[in-house]
Image: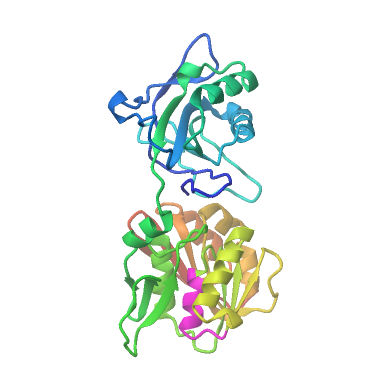
Amino acid sequence: MVASNSKGKSKSKGKGGACSASTTPDSPFPTPDCPTTPESQMPNPSSPPSGFLELSLCLHADQQEAVEAALEEVGALAVTLLDADADTSNEQAILEPGVGETPLWSRIVLTALFDAGTDRSGLLMVLTELLPDLDPAQITFREVADQDWTRAWMDQFKPMQFGRRLWVYPWNIEPPETADNIVVRLDPGLAFGTGTHPTTALCLEWLDRMDLAGKSIIDYGCGSGILAIAAALLGAQQVCAVDNDPQAIESSRSNAQRNGVAERITLHLPGAEDSAPVDLLVANILAGPLHALAPTFAAHLKPGGHIALSGILFGQHIELLERYAEWFDELVVSQCEDWVRIEGIRSGSS
């Protein structure tokens, strides 16, 4: 997730833009070794302000809440958190938190966006009043040009094929008119799932291979709704999409409407979905939740129903195979890069 130019808070749990840090004796804040903005790149004070002012600071996880609150109090438009140890041997992978969890790295690079015309000296003065332990010398600033982030994303997102018939197209590219192709149209949104990640690709390829005509299916962890929409376009009669993030529910609803399949897709938070067994279930989440949800998924499927699980790193599949063997037969593993998909058939026994 990247910070946008809309007011709000963005916490980016990914790589990139991190700096190394070391703790100095006179301050509890890590001292960043980040490069400062060269004088030749400093904005001309006579020019009208445009874009944003970005503040960067290295800190420890236990300081994040107080620092973020102070930044929001002084007018931060968005806040982003990055792993300070990214691309080092100390890098910590945080893929997707559980419900109600906000895991953080031990050392964080925090960046905050402000209006371009924000006075740096005044900002530092207020921050040091709110955070007495903060050394202003540990903060760096740089100018960030305003961009059309949607357009930038659309320019990089190209049509992708999954299996024999299924394609994912951005809204700015018209697909060719062919009788066989099934096309999912997506806009950039706030929820995960465009088909570019190997786990999504594995699930889309599985859907393309299955006979979905007139069938019922659950998409557990729907994100953008890409799998639910693909299932409906491939002929599924009833699609139940489930996610624990209300933002994902809204993204899925919007994308389903744009693809003309909203009437066949119902959207639910976990536990609110229909209890009637379905013909197929696809879950692209993570190994931990997949392990915990095995009996729930088994209860959701009819005997002989098909299941596909992804969001699983290679090596994690071994324990999951043992877990799902209690309820599923013919378990098969497929791999794409470092990720795998497990598929199987619901056994006739309970």
Q: How many marks?
A: 0
Q: Residue furthest top?
A: 26
Can you give x and y, in whole percent of width and height, for residue 156 in the image? Answer: 32, 59
Indicate whether residue 227 is drawn in magenta: yes
Q: Nearer the viewer, residue 157 or 325?
A: 157
Q: Residue furthest front?
A: 46
Instruction: Reply above or below: 96 against 151.
Output: above
Q: Which residues are magenta?
A: 226-237
Q: Residue at x 48, y 20 (%)?
A: 30
Counting from the top left corner in percent of width and height, residue 146 is at 41, 46
Side of 221 where 152 appears, left or right: left
> Is residue 137 in the magenta section?
no
Q: Give the percent coordinates (x, y) of residue 121.
A: 51, 21
Report x, y in % for residue 278: 61, 79
Quadrant of the rendered image containing residue 160: bottom left
Between residue 264 and residue 36, name the one nearer to us: 36
Image quadrant holding the C terminus, namely bottom right
| Chief secondary structure of the magenta portion | helix
The reply, left or right, for residue 179 in relation to residue 213 is left
Q: Is residue 219 visible?
A: no
Q: Is residue 158 above or below residue 16?
A: below
Relative horizontal placement of residue 345, taking residue 100 as reference (left or right): left
